[in-house]
């Protein structure tokens, strides 16, 4: 049996200040996320941040909360259900997909235990981040390593690091945007917004910015957009330090002031919709743009459980399985191995 541990960031379990505080405490205590020396960071985190941010953040979560819970959890779980159904059909009984969250529940330790108990001796760990950042991807690998330190017998493991330029991912993104344009029409400008990162992380060698730029270059090429039809930005900055630029919110104002009235926004770094896309972009970004004089801002949903993404995901893993012992592993159906 092959196990696939699909890992996303994690999310509060309720849109309330206490639940958001618990979540932020765990998330922002991770030294991969905030790299300041602990002695400096601890009083800031336990002072102003955990005092004031949870209430404001909880209001943001409340504005996009779904009947079944936090969007990040709901869409990540649907994605895993769709992946499980895909492999149940391709090779019944041979693959087990399990969702885990880096912060909160279901934890990485719980996810690994479920796969072990299901008899998985070969394991993929797949962070749901197409672009590598130490703050996200490496933190998941840390947590997997930390948990496995307590196991006597560990499985054979492959960690999928990134897929920012994989043709199947680019193709799925482009197809989902084209499908959206067929249904809703195309605005004057496509804004391609990625989660931000402190500039200092890139200065220390994080490949995140160049991976985002490569994703954008491949995407606009596949969409055959000319240079005046798109713009790439970074959103969700946190704290006072300089983050990657151009900033999404400032760009929205500048575009409105320069006479652009209709914008479509897509966020290719988010595999599942969440507070950063549904609240910060689709609600707050829209308000910012309209207040600055723009007329329409439309958010193009993340890939979520789109069948295009399920196919792309299986294609991203495909070469990895082929390298595993073929006697134990299902032969990968040739029809699935082709891209396009
Ligand atoms: C120093 C702080 C942060 C870094 C660095 C950071 C990097 C980073 N984050 C994502 C993806 C997501 N972040 C999300 C929420 C979120 N991010 C931060 C801070 C940093 N992120 C905070 C404080 C929050 C919580 C919301 C808030 O209070 O503003 C989410 C959504 C979670 C959800 O529950 O919906 C995602 C996804 C990436 C990809 C990244 C580095 C590239
Ligand atoms: Fe974040
Ligand atoms: Fe945000």
Image (cartoon, rainbow, N blue to C red):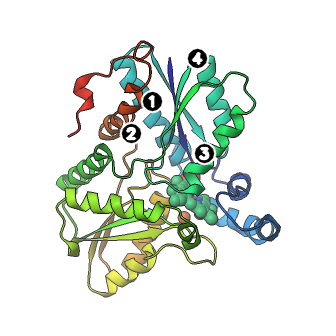
- Pick whichever of labels 3 and 2 is earlier in the sequence: 3
- Pick whichever of labels 4 and 1 is earlier in the sequence: 1
Mark 1 lies on residue:
81
Q: Nearer the viewer, mark 3 or mark 4?
A: 3
What quarter of the picture does the C terminus occupy? top left
Per the image, label 3 sits on a secondary structure element best described as helix
Mark 3 to mark 1 CA distance (whole Å): 21 Å
- Asked if 45 appears above or below 100 in the picture, the reply is below
Q: Residue at x 36, y 38 (%)?
A: 316
- Asked if 33 appears above or below 9 in the picture, the reply is below
Q: Residue at x 43, y 63 (%)?
A: 194
Disc assigned to residue 305: 2
Mark 4 to mark 2 CA distance (whole Å): 24 Å
Q: Is residue 299 visible?
A: no
Q: Nearer the viewer, mark 3 or mark 2?
A: 3
Q: Position of residue 43 (x, y in %)?
A: 82, 69
Mark 3 to mark 4 CA distance (whole Å): 22 Å
- Mark 3 in CB contact with mark 2 (< 8 angstroms): no
Q: Position of residue 39 (x, y in %)?
A: 83, 67
Mark 1 to mark 2 CA distance (whole Å): 8 Å
Q: Residue at x 40, y 71 (%)?
A: 233
Query: On the image, which quarter does residue 213 sit in?
Result: bottom left
Mark 3 lies on residue:
140
Q: How many marks?
A: 4
In the displayed image of the protein, which residue is found farthest to the bottom? 257
Mark 4 lies on residue:
118
- Pick whichever of labels 4 and 2 is earlier in the sequence: 4
Q: Nearer the viewer, mark 4 or mark 2?
A: 4
Q: Nearer the viewer, residue 334 or 93?
A: 334
């Amino acid at each position: 049996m092959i196990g696939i541990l699909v890992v996303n960031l994690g999310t509060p379990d309720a849109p309330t200040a206490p639940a958001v505080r618990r979540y932020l405490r765990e998330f922002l205590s991770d030294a991969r996320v905030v790299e300041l020396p602990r002695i400096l960071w601890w009083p800031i985190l336990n002072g102003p941040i955990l005092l004031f941010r949870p209430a404001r953040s909880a209001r943001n979560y409340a504005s996009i909360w779904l009947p079944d819970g936090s969007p990040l959890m709901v869409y990540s779980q649907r994605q895993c259900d769709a992946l499980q159904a895909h492999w149940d059909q391709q090779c019944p009984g041979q693959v087990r997909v399990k969702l885990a969250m880096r912060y909160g529940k279901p934890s990485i330790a719980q996810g690994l235990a479920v796969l072990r108990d299901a008899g998985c001796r070969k394991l993929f760990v797949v962070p749901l981040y197409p672009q590598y950042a130490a703050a996200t991807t490496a933190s998941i690998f840390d947590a997997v390593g930390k948990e496995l330190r307590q196991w006597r017998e560990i499985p054979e493991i492959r960690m999928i690091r990134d897929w920012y330029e994989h043709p199947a991912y680019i193709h799925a993104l482009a197809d989902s945007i084209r499908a959206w344009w067929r249904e809703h029409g195309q605005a004057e400008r496509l804004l391609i917004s990625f989660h931000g990162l402190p500039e200092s992380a890139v200065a220390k060698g994080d490949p995140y910015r160049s991976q985002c730029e490569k994703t954008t270059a491949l995407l606009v090429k596949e969409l055959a957009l000319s240079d005046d039809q798109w713009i790439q930005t970074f959103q969700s900055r946190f704290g006072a330090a300089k983050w990657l630029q151009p900033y999404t919110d400032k760009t929205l104002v500048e575009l409105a002031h320069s006479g652009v009235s209709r914008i479509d926004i897509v966020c290719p770094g988010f595999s599942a919709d969440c507070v950063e896309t549904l609240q910060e972009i689709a609600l707050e970004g829209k308000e910012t743009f309209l207040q600055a004089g723009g007329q329409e801002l439309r958010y193009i949903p993340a890939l979520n459980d789109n069948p295009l993404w399920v196919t792309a995901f299986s294609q991203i893993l495909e070469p990895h399985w082929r390298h595993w012992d073929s006697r134990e592993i299902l032969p990968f159906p040739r029809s699935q191995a082709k891209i396009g």
